[in-house]
Amino acid sequence: MARVHVGSLSITGNFRGNNEDRLAVDPDGRFHLVADGMGGQSAGEQASEMAIELIGKGLDKELDFEEISSETVIETIDRVVTAANTEILALAQLEPRFHNMGTTVVFVVAAGGKFYAGGIGDSRVYRLRDGSFEQLTTDHSLTQALLDAKTISPEEAITHRYRNVLYRYLGSKEGGEGTSPEVLEPAEGDRFLLCSDGVTDGVDDLTLTGILNDGDDPQQIAEAIVAAALEGGSKDNITAIVLRLD
């Protein structure tokens, strides 16, 4: 199994009063998570914190990281994420101040010699391999749905008024419908980026590719990505985890 080197950073940014993003870096390199909360102030923070804590603990407890059956690994990941979704939904119904809360989540999980990259919402996982930069997750946004239906063009999607409107997230009934992970054979030299939409609001793919390629220290790369998003005018919280394999 390739060795994983990790860097991460999450900041409030210039336009928000609080940081509703959360991240988790497993010290043993078994899983990495990014969540972007919504619902305003304490509600978004509560949702993203619950997602990170519940999914992290659930994976730790329920997933056999030596498991080589991809079907079993995906079933376990989805069960853990669905359980977190149920708890977030329940609290939102019980507690008036959390009524509108929800959160995205994306992950990279290492199990049985493979990587699993997936999520719910519009946070993203990218992979850079041999100069090719690829988005591994699909946005669960109305804009992506319109793109898929070929109703709008990729150029229109960049500034579309529905680009931040989600039809699936944790805290929604659709949040328990599976995480559709990409099953990946890790290779030496692979670089992964997990990020909230605060990154992609401020940095285009070409710039991200250049930064991910620059140097070997994942912490410096994560910091450079967050700084570029801030400089690029991102109006959200900004969170990035960078993985480098050797």
Image (cartoon, grey):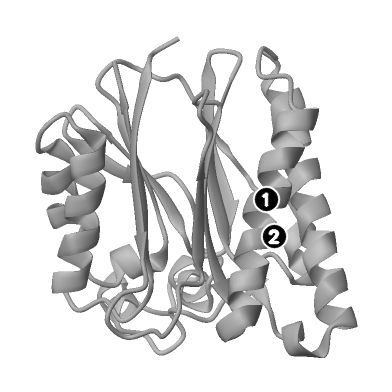
Please give the name of the residue rendered at 24% of the width and 21% of the height, measured from the top-left corner.
Answer: 189
Residue 72: percent from left, percent from top: 76, 24
Q: Is residue 221 above or below residue 163?
A: above
Q: Nearer the viewer, residue 39 or 133?
A: 39
Residue picked out by circle 1 = 53
Please give the name of the residue rendered at 67% of the width and 57% of the height, measured from the top-left corner. 51
Q: Position of residue 29 (x, y in %)?
A: 49, 26
162 or 233: nearer the eye? Answer: 233
Of residues 94 and 115, the one nearer the viewer is 94
Label 2 Cα neighbours within 10 Å, binned few <14 / some 14-19 / many ≥20: many
Judge left or right: residue 157 versus residue 112.
left
Cβ atoms at labels 2 and 1 below 8 Å apart: yes
Please tell me whether residue 222 is drawn above or below residue 146 in the rendered image.
above
Q: Position of residue 178 (x, y in %)?
A: 72, 50
Indicate which disc residue 204 carries: none
- Can residue 161 be seen in the rendering of this structure? yes
* Viewer-nearest residue: 168 or 227: 227
Mark 2 lies on residue: 50
Residue depicted at x 47% and y 69%: 144
Which quadrant holds the N terminus? top left
Mark 1, other Cα within 10 Å: few <14 / some 14–19 / many ≥20:
some
Which percent across, then down, holds residue 93? 87, 81
Residue drawn at x 36%, y 77% is 236
Amino acid under label 1?
Glu
Please identify the quadrant where the C terminus is shown: top left
